[in-house]
Amino acid sequence: MIDLKALREDPDRFRDGASAKRIDVDIDRILELDAARRSALTEAEQARAQQKALSREIGPQIGQARGALKKASDAERPALEASIAELEAKPAALKAQVQAAESRVAQATQPLQALLLHVPLPPDEDVPRGGGAEDNVELRRWTPEPWNTDLSFEAARGFTPRTHLDLIDQHALADFPRGVKVGGARHYALTGDGMLLHQAVLRMGFDLITCEKGFKPMSVPVIVRESCMEGTGFFPEGREQAYHIEESNRGAGHDLFLTGTGEVGLMGLFADEILDRDQLPLKMATVSTCFRREAGAAGRDTAGLYRIHQFDKVEQVVIDVADDAGERAHHKMMIGIVEELLQRLELPYRLLQCCTGDLGPKNADMVDVECWMPSRGELDENDRPKGDWGETHSASRLHDFQCRRLNLRYRDDDGNTKFCWSLNNTVVASPRILIPLLEIHQQEDGSVKIPEALQPFMHGRTTIG
């Protein structure tokens, strides 16, 4: 959730930010509800203060009147009784005024909180403006020898490539029909060398981020409460992408959701905590199974391993103090780790600076990493794909967006509490990464060369097939 005080002071920044991200949110209605809530809060506080003052004043007065009543004549009693009744009625009137004001606070708070959940974090000023992925800006690319992504695979390697589906079939790396039989569309079962390769690349990524780069290895729940999905910014906008477990219908106190990334669990572990300054930065990594419904993706990348419902991912998260320069340094470091991994895997890749229209609600900035996949892209005259880039990683800076929603704070050197800032990035996600791994390293006879850096995680094997 964004800072309501900041929105109140500069609503145009949030209007422009929502517009740049192509997200429709009624800022004027938020300001209206906020004003109504604050006015009602003020009225309630003032009425409560009057209640306290009145109680101090009329208590002795009522006591005196009751004492006088005991000694009063029949003629004096009606006036004294009326006076006592009038004094006793004053606190009741103020109590009713407090209750009415508190009711107006509640009436404004619920819709206000609901609307605030939809307000996106404004993009940083240096993020390029654009409408969508087509306006993202390439930062740089890297290709191993003898690759040249400006050439076709055949021109670069001297033979016609097989797609990853061809290679999977040739080497029995996955069983799609049986996966569909068990789980339905977009499910699969990795088999034989396919499962070994999947586990090898995950372990290579996890060892790199933890053993070499110093990130703390963690396990996390992948079944979480709604508050955790909301706190990390995946709800409400991404709700349709999550698998919902309706435990409340079976007598449990709350529903649960399957996470689409280990980031949800890593961040949720520290919700509602105040960390000491010397605990930061927290640098954590996890490997977890991830679940995504891929709602609205019908007809796009439905064959093969690119867009599936279940996968495994090594994720890295950093939680640190509120500092722009420090956050940017973390971001650069995290992207560098991914580049190092892809270079060890000898995979051509490029970095894309995402434009405002491709950021999503929670990101101040995001850089995507795409690998070259020969089986993607337009078809040539022989109905063979020309090759294209496919997203494999995404590195985000989120400022205080998640931490504010999770109420995750730290105590600075002066003892003041502030909201932490967070970042996240994919280290490696599989089996999607197997697409470029198989296709880039295929040989003319259909065998697949295992990159040298990956061979120790494949028990020394140098090839598949």
Image: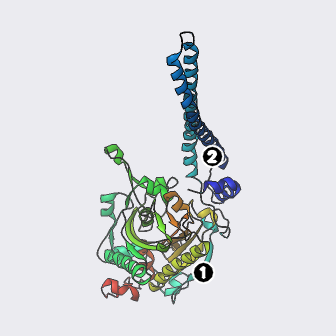
Rendering quarter of residue 223: bottom left
Q: CA distance from mark 2 to mark 1?
A: 45 Å
Rendering quarter of residue 98: top right
Q: Secondary structure at mark 2?
A: helix
Rendering quarter of residue 127: bottom right
Q: What is the quadrant of the C terminus in the image? A: bottom left
**Residue at (62%, 50%) from the top-left corner?**
25
As shown in the figure, which amino acid type bears the numbered disc 1?
Answer: Arg
Disc marking residue 140: 1
- In this view, 207 is above or below 397: below
Give residue 414's position: percent from left, percent from top: 56, 69
As shown in the figure, which amino acid type bears the numbered disc 2?
Answer: Asp
**Residue at (63%, 57%) from the top-left corner?**
22
**Residue at (49%, 77%) from the top-left corner?**
374
Question: Which label sits in the foreground, 2 or 1?
Answer: 2
Q: Residues within 10 Å of mark 2 (few under 14, many from 20)?
A: many
Disc marking residue 34: 2
Give residue 453's position: percent from left, percent from top: 40, 87
Q: Secondary structure at mark 1?
A: strand
